[in-house]
Image: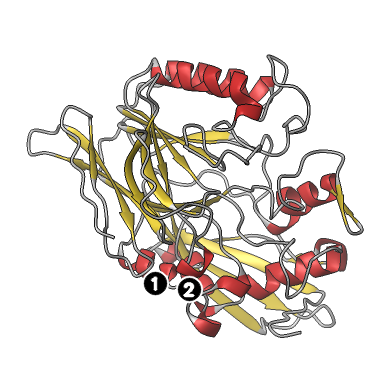
Amino acid sequence: MLGACPGKAGQVRLTYFPSGNKPAARSTPWRTTREEQDFTAQWKIVDLLPGTKYSTIVEARSLSDGSDATAVVTGTFQTAPESTEARDVTFCFTTCHDFIRRDDGMLGHKIYPSMTRMQPDFVVHAGDIEYYDKPSPWAMTKELMRFKWGRIFALPNYRSFYNSTSTYFMKDDHDTLRNDCWAGQTYGTMSFEEGVKLFNEEQFPAHFPRYKTVNWGKELQVWFLEGRDYRSPNTIPDGPEKTILGAEQKAWLFKTLSESTATFKIVCSPTPIVGPDRKNKKDNHANNTFAYEGDEIRDNLSKLENVIVLCGDRHWQYASVDKQTQLWEFGCGPGSDKHQFGWKAGDQRPTHQFLRVKGGFLSGALTHSESGIPKLTIRHHKTTGEAVSEFVFPQSAPARESHQ
């Protein structure tokens, strides 16, 4: 099939060092790749320096004779600064990509060179990185799911961007199993549980639990929510026990938010918490099917200053403010204009502070005035990089622009 990138058993190792300081390089032992893990390998690196750019060298060699490396891939990544350090930070946020709706031919998606030009310290991919339940092919077996991952991440724009950008990967429904999925369901020969394992342990960095929070310096703390592993079926009656986050993750979220000393608190969610969303949708906190937990989350988040939600999943760009709690939410929009659908252009509701039914991405820029006062600027961008909105926080005078 077009784009197939079959793996092969071999050995790989990782060498890493602070950029410009190769004498400090450390190398992992050679690790054997196996078919059972789709010939993938992962390393957990500890004792990294904060606020540091690292260079990486990944080498591969054959199993047969322990010869020199036959393939070498180089890259870089950036570590977060100390939680006590005041530092400018730039990041991007994206969602909803797939091979069949890419907009840059066999290079991939246009947003990747656009985001590269911004030189972000990190990027968040909020899920639906690929779509198992869309054609060319319908990925109803483990082999076809793996095929889709190999194909899309082999595209040049993807390789170039992710080789040099620190990234937090989240998952949603289409890259877990199928649309609006939950535990116990199947798709072809694959179970929900197998789809979760494929994402959580094989194709993306493995860590448990899947939710976490990271300080990017003194003024910015970021939360990454897990929206599939702990959720209730959409079909059961709403109430205190119905959940997307699960009791443990929800308690952790409220506790860590209340303990945070960061000026700005960014909550990254695969799906909307504020919305608005379409009336026929039943899969997120902006829908009536999860109204009880949605109200609970919006109420808790709004009690704290400068908590802002960034979400994926929706195929249009928006900024909104919940009329009950005044909680802000930004939807980044899909990865290409080919992927936009689901909302009528011009249907701007009272909740909306900005609406654009196109593809693109979000950026965030934490900066400091000459007196050291921090501000956070969030912008929507076209796929080609041009900014089409601007919101400045704290909210005393949030600026707003809109360019369709």
Q: Is residue 89 above or below residue 243?
A: below
Q: Residue furthest right?
A: 189
Residue 25 appears in the picture as rendered = no
Q: Is residue 398 above or below residue 333?
A: above
**x and y percent of residue 101 in the render?**
57, 71
> Considering the image in quadrants, where does the N terminus appear?
bottom right
Q: Which of pointers 1 and 2 lies earlier in the amino acid sequence? A: 1
Marks 1,2: beta carbons within 8 A = yes
Residue 148 appears in the picture as rendered = yes
Q: Is residue 54 above or below residue 149?
A: above
Q: Is residue 54 left or right of residue 137?
A: left
What colour-coding does the image apply? secondary structure
From the image, state whether disc 1 or disc 2 is nearer to you: 1
Element marked by disc 1: helix
In three-dimensional space, the C-alpha distance between marks 1 and 2, rounded to whole angstroms, equals 9 Å
Q: Which residue is mark 1?
A: 113
Q: Which residue is mark 2?
A: 160
Q: Residue at x 52, y 79 (%)?
A: 156
**x and y percent of residue 332 in the render?**
43, 51
> Considering the image in quadrants, where does the C terminus appear?
bottom left
Element marked by disc 2: helix
Q: Residue at x 52, y 55 (%)?
A: 95
